[in-house]
Image: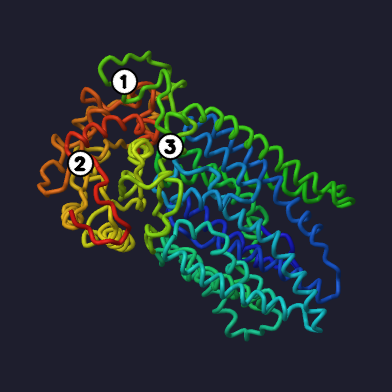
Amino acid sequence: MDEVRPGFRPDVEGLRATAVLLVVAYHVWLGRVSGGVDVFLFLSAFFLVGGLVRRLERGERVSVPRQWLRVFQRLVPAAAVVVAATVAAGLVLFPQPRWRGLLVDAVGSLTYSENWVLAARAVDYYAADKGQASPLQHMWSLSVQGQAFVLVPLLVVGAGWVARRWGRSPATVVGVVLAVAVAVSLAWSVHTTATRQAFAYFDSASRVWELALGGLLAVLLPQLRVPRAVAEPLGWAGLLALVACGMVLDVTRSFPGWVALWPLLCAAAVLVAGTTPTRWGVDRLLSTRPLVAAGGFSYALYLVHWPVLVLWLATSGRPRAGVLDGAVVVAASLVLAQVLTRLVERPVRRLDWPATAPWRSAGVVLGSAGLVAGLAGGGVLRLDHDAARGDRLSAGHEVAGYPGARALAGGVSVRALPVDRRLPASTALRREFASLPARCSGDWAARAPLTEGCTVLEPARAATATVLVVGDSHAEQWLATVTPIAEREGWRVIALLEGGCSFGAASSRTGACARWNAAALDYVTSHRADLLVTVATAAHPRTPGERLVAGYEEVVRAVTAHGTPVVGLRDNPRFASGVVACALERGDEACTAPVSEKLAPRDPAAALDVEGFTDVDLTDLVCPAGRCPPAVGNVWVYLDDNHLTTSYVATLAPALEQRLRAAGAWPDGGGVVEAGATLSR
């Protein structure tokens, strides 16, 4: 995964092989972070910066555009082949709801922006079921690396120019710049890992320090002299600690903060130890023929192993590979990696004619990446066109032939349509999470840890009422029901949301969820609102073990004591696997479950006797006639295994309004005052 290698060191090739084999083994069998990817980034910068600095020290002129072309001419063709093959296999093996995500990932992979795609998507990189992960998810690290291959030559050449102007050594100036980058990026990485770990994992700014540290070692290494008595144990300690990193440390939720220093310092120890004249040095092991050979195809092995694993799991229906099938995955990956290296990577790298003119090299890079990315991008546009059919429905408007829950009302007839004509398009289900258009600001601004999840819908004129929607993604989905009503009535809607953290007493939670709930309760009780909408219960995907949300009664009493009425919506039934994918493959009947198998016989929130609290149960509209089907009124009810589609939930707006009015919980906006005012009713 490098380009510039000044003076071949077989032990470093063996270190690279060790890192990639750790990544493969941990991905296939252990499901944990190994630190191997961090070593890749570290070594990439080590080689790149070291080579460029040496050229500048010799007084050579470095052409940044030519440097870019040399690097990407080697990297892009092999990546394009893997991405194209993965997309082709995914379109055959994956259900339609996964197609759009696959195509988006293909574009992100070949434009070296996949890490940002995943950061925005907030992918759970450590999901227990790897078969549901993107087969191109691993391309995030190559995107970070590609971004570095663009920026690092600019930085080094710029530092060389400054060095000449100041009469300094290029190595000195580059070293200072890299040291500053390490300090700033590491501080940012520690902060974002502690506050937004899922985002930080893919964030380039949180990874810059790993690359900068590798470059800094390349600058300093020529000045380091380590005695043999220290070098030998140092090298072995580095290698053994690297292998043990993921087993000793539970780094699953703590990368890439300060914990990432472990694998990087291990790699640095091996590099500093260098080559030794005795048979006992770690370099003797790392220089063995099998490891050096594996290092030669390590880039290809990294490219192919994850798609092979995910495609196998998707085909077999298993959440994780076992010992035997995992061994087959690894063996297949090793074979494919060697084929890819011999037939694509090495032949393209050795082509003479691209080197004779920059435009030819650019043609190799842009042709291989552009063709695949263009086709994938065209596929995304086509799927988005199909998805646009359901936009009016998800916005709360009626669409002829797609009544959704309105089909359950008396006098409404609807002709059932085939599954491929239902709304929303099965390839657009990722878009079916509800949202509000703006961040909270002004009197309604929120402080950390609420900042990211606080959004608002402001009416065009003065708000007639203010409604708060608070909780996790199961509260978020009901925004699609509240929003059409709010737009008609002129309400202000504020959403306080935190994925995986339902609204309950902070004392019933731990860690970040406890802190979020404490802050959410403080926000709700210190701001004036006419109604608080929450989800009161939590269903179970496999049993009717529905229960009241932990700590729910406590927060209801706290909120109503301040005069704000609370509506507790009953949770929707949950399934163990994707409902739409099941219906597309097996039909509606096979994917319909009795409500008695999904929810408690009676709404647990109905027993909550608190003045100002109203429980609302819409189960009869999600599971009509006691059965929970994939679709109602030609509209998909579920977008995955436990969330309702925005399109269907929007059709529940009339029913919610009717039941709120009947229960006397309709917000009338009487006495609305500014945020922060003392509430009295």
Disc 1 crowd, CA 10 A, few/some/many (<14, 14-19, 20+): some
Read off the residue under disc 2: 665
Along the line of sight, which residue is nearer the eye, 175 or 398? 398
Instruction: Determine whether the residue tagged by mark 1 lies in a helix, strand or loop.
Output: helix
Nearer to us of marks 3 and 1 is 1
Task: Report how far apart the C-alphas of labels 1 and 2 lie in the structure.
Answer: 26 Å
Amino acid type of the residue tagged 1 in the rendering: Ala
List x then y, in percent, for residue 238: 54, 73
Residue 627 visible in the displayed image: yes
- Residue for point 54% across, 79% down: 233
The image quarter in which residue 595 lies? top left
Task: Report how far apart the C-alphas of labels 2 and 3 lie in the structure.
Answer: 28 Å
List x then y, in percent, for residue 539: 24, 41
Instruction: Determine whether the residue tagged by mark 2 lies in a helix, strand or loop.
Output: loop
Amino acid type of the residue tagged 3 in the rendering: Glu
- The answer to whether mark 2 and mark 3 are in CB contact below 8 A is no
Amino acid type of the residue tagged 2 in the rendering: Ala
Which one is earlier in the sequence, the residue at label 2 or at label 3? 3
Which one is earlier in the sequence, the residue at label 3 or at label 1? 1
Read off the residue under disc 3: 432
Q: Which mark is residue 111?
A: none
Image-based side of 382 in relation to 121, left or right:
right
Task: Report how far apart the C-alphas of labels 3 and 1 lie in the structure.
Answer: 20 Å
Disc 3 crowd, CA 10 A, few/some/many (<14, 14-19, 20+): many
Instruction: Determine whether the residue tagged by mark 3 lies in a helix, strand or loop.
Output: loop
Which one is earlier in the sequence, the residue at label 1 or at label 2? 1
Read off the residue under disc 1: 407
Along the line of sight, which residue is nearer the eye, 382 or 340? 382
Most extreme residue toward the right is: 356
List x then y, in percent, for residue 663: 17, 37
